[in-house]
Image: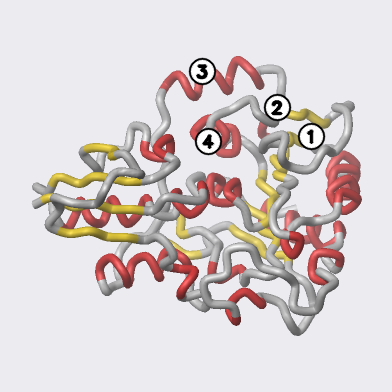
Amino acid sequence: MRILIKRLAALGDVILMTPIVKHARNLYPDAHIAISTLYPQVFEQNPYFNELVNPHAPVQGYDKVIDLDGCYEASPSMHAIDAYSIKAFNSTNYDKSTELFLKLSDRVHVYNEASSLNLFRCVVIHPSVSWPSRTLPRETWLEVIDKLISKGLSVIIVGTNNDLDLGPTRHHVYNLKNMFSIHQVSYLISKALCFIGTDSSMVHVAGTTKTPIVGIFTCVKAEYRLPYRNGQYDSLCATVKPDIDCYGCLEKHISATNLACDRGDNACVKMIKSDNILKALDSVIGT
């Protein structure tokens, strides 16, 4: 039996595809499973599939095609992995934990680059730039950093140069953007005290670890994005969300891929306060 599982983009959405691939292997242990995606790096070392195929090639020669493109976008009022699962298997009753499989060289690279840091006293943050309705103001992130430092913690910034520029590196703040692959970031987060981020690819990378997560959600409800880990939903996660009646407005917009604020002012991101982020951090690290 030949099976194709397809999800082209984006990076976080492809990470959310990993439990689908594993469950397909469990259901069809002898099948030839192919994956079509623009983010093939997600599946490095993954033991549950047979080949990566050209994502631009015609889809033909398969007994079963699981096309997840546009899947959760068409069902914005459920968890993304549940939307995938219903499309793929007509069931959500299995372990939906996401996974990345690291090589020894990934661990060595992170160790070499971060050997001077006490990662157990570091908080990893991702100041993501995304839709205006889920991009926190730069000032909010700077306040978070200052308050983390005042607690005796260090801060590691991950992401790319497309994310917010939080200024020059200073004492207890380490800018490691563009230094690591997603597997290496996963390992870095796995050794850190906590991860703080908005609804972005990095929160899904963090979801492949056992490290506590502070997830910041605005136009998308947390319950539709927080990770399944260790076989459980929402394991070791705290949510920060705005106190506004239009929170989670995406669920009213079928197939939206670049949501504009219905109010026109993106008030939700402006309502996220650094004090609430630090309070959520305290709740998951036990201080």
Which amino acid, mark 1?
A: Ser
Callout 3: 10 Å neighbours few (<14), some, many (20+)? few
- Above or below: residue 107 compared with residue 232: above
CA gap, disc 4 to disc 2?
21 Å
- Give the amino acid type for the residue marked by disc 3 in the picture: Val
Residue underneath mark 4: 182
Q: Residues within 10 Å of mark 1 (few under 14, many from 20)?
A: many
The answer to which of 19 and 5 lies nearer the viewer is 5
Sequence-first disc among 2 and 1: 2
Residue 262 falls in image quadrant: bottom right
Between marks 1 and 4, how big is the CA–CA gap?
A: 21 Å
Quadrant in the picture for residue 194: top right
Which of marks 4 and 3 precedes in the sequence?
3
Q: Earlier in the sequence, mark 1 or mark 4?
A: 1
Q: Which callout, 3 or 1, points at the residue further toward the start of the chain?
A: 3
**In the rendered image, which residue does mark 2 sit on?**
118
Q: From where the camera sits, is residue 175 visible?
A: yes
> Relative to residue 2, is residue 37 drawn left or right?
right
Q: Residue at x 68, y 65 (%)?
A: 217
* Labels 4, 2: front one: 4
Measured as percent of width and height from the top left, residue 9 is found at 47, 51
Q: Are the residues at dot 1 and dot 4 in contact (C-beta closer than 8 Å)? A: no
State the residue lying farthest toward the bottom. Answer: 245
| Callouts 3 and 4 close, C-beta under 8 Å | no
Rendered view: 74 above or below 51: below
- Read off the residue under disc 3: 108
